[in-house]
Image: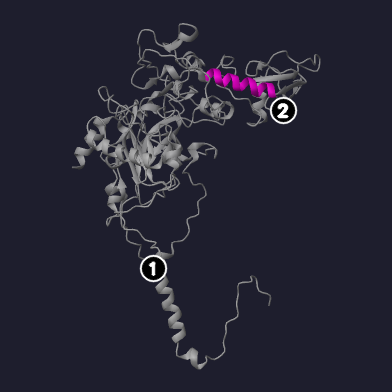
Amino acid sequence: MQSLTQRAQPVDRRPMTWVEKIYLWNIFRGMLITLVHLFSKKVTINYPEQTRPFSPVFRGLHILNRDEEGRERCTACGLCAVACPAEAITMEAAERLPGEEKLYREEKYAARYEINMLRCIFCGLCEEACPKDAIYLTETIAPANYSRRSFIYGKEDLLIPDPNTQPAEYAKARGQIDKKKKAGA
Amino acid sequence: MAEEKKLFKVTIDNITIEVEPGTTILNAARMIGSQVAPPAMCYYSKLQGSGGKCRTCLVEVAAGSTADPRPMPKLVASCRTTVMDGMVVKNTTSEKVLDARAGVVEFLLINHPLDCPICDQAGECDLQDLSYAHGSESTRFEFQKRIFEKHDLGPYIQLHMTRCILCYRCVYVADQLTSKRVHGVLDRGERSEIATYIEKALDNDFIGNVIDVCPVGALTDKTFRFKNRVWFTKPVDAHRHCTKCCGRVRLWLRGNEVLRVTTRRDKWGEVESLPDGTPGWICNECRFEKKHVSSWEIDGPTRIDRHSVIAQGHYVDLEIPNDPLVKVMHGNKPRLLLDIHSVSEVNKPGIDLAALPGPPTSKVYDQGNDKKE
């Protein structure tokens, strides 16, 4: 029979000689491999003290963005939910009342916004679909958890800190981005 | 048949059809099919006198008739031009028409705000479809768009004048369906606007139909406002016995909630004709008051064109594969590890969106939170 590839090698089925039977040579060869790896460069790192560089297109945990004045950008247009191949995103819209102009950018906003992280496949199509620059995938890896309940991310989990009411948190979030940009540049 | 009616032979995009004299080019093209029919924003076959305003249905007449085969010098509005015998019309086969149509779309979009993410019409908007098919990617308009004072048209109808393209369809509806028209187009040119002038609510029994004829999101249903996106609701055809109207409607459901009631639409986006040939307009009571499935008898799911965004998530002819787990586990169903409704804040039973007379606000959702706690 003609072999499909050139890689197949016939197995040597001759009985072992006396030298082969005491396995010393094979043990020595195996230990040599171990010895080489002992002095070679380690492939692991001490996470989380050390982190690996992220690819610029890495897609991690989602955030809901705010504009320069701290108003929520999302208008619950539903394009992310309709683009989502895993059907992970759901939302409910509400009309902005008079007096809420500082909270929400547009007349309509997402009163509820939920991403089911158990379903999410981090494809980034929601980010691509968003016409309002409201949803972004960050460089944060979605954290593990023991309970399934904690994977339903609501608006309070997704929204970035408000620069007006939480300036410290906002600065912290921004500061890391700036540092990374500098390091990259 | 003593006197045979003479039929006119007209060729549209190389397809020949025989139509009765007096038919417009647009209607002749619609008889051939949707591939040939020019788009129409203002023409509405069920409204007399409509058409001739938006210019999206422009076509090229390559030969006027057999008697006078000269081409027409300019593009003509097909909704207003009647056919002649031996007329040769070019719609999508003419470069000139496509170019002109792109120009018309650009003009229509000059004053149209880009608030599709907010607009309730998005997903079933004629202008959205038109600009998707014929529009350019970006705007060349650098000036401020029109701004209007907000007018309140009563508890049922929401007016967004900035989105209006002045097609006059709603004016014809009020003229032809209601006894007295109280709204119309005021002022002229760039300042012309749909309004009631003396802040009067539109309250005729059939005035709700202006929502359905509006090709854009200028007139929308206040009882549906912001409640859901069109493509997340499930359309079903339903009917009820109504003393005022035909009672044949389309319900837009979320689960068992009737979020919106509209007329049934045919493939031209117009209200469907009843079996006796009259248009199936519906009354305000059917449209705004009956927001409960028990009021309706459901005829079946609406057939939605699969190219429409409304068809997303509608799995037609779905074959659910047999779950082998049930067999392996001796008929026991696998244990549900997470009931999403026990965690999710969306679609909570305490909040009945369908029962709300207007758009949901933060008050509605905060109230729902209290109920849960």
Of residue B205 and residue B138, the one placed in the foreground of this image is: B138
For mark 1, what is the residue? A39
Q: Secondary structure at mark 1?
A: helix
Q: Are marks 1 and 2 in contact (CB under 8 Å)?
A: no
Q: Does the image show residue B154?
A: yes
Tell me where residue B220 sits by quadrant: top left
Name the amino acid, label 2: Asp
Colour setup of the view: one colour
Q: Residues within 10 Å of mark 1 (few under 14, many from 20)?
A: few
Q: Position of residue A103 (x, y in %)?
A: 28, 28
Name the amino acid, label 1: Phe
Q: Which mark is residue B126?
A: none
Compared to residue B99, the image places residue B194 above or below, namely above
**Image side of residue A133 versus residue B348, left or right:** right
Q: CA distance from mark 1 to mark 2?
A: 77 Å
Q: Does the image show residue B44?
A: no
Chain holding disc 2: B
By secondary structure, the bulk of the magenta-drawn segment is best described as helix
**Image side of residue A93 versus residue B17, left or right:** left
Compared to residue A135, the image places residue B285 above or below, namely above
Chain holding disc 1: A
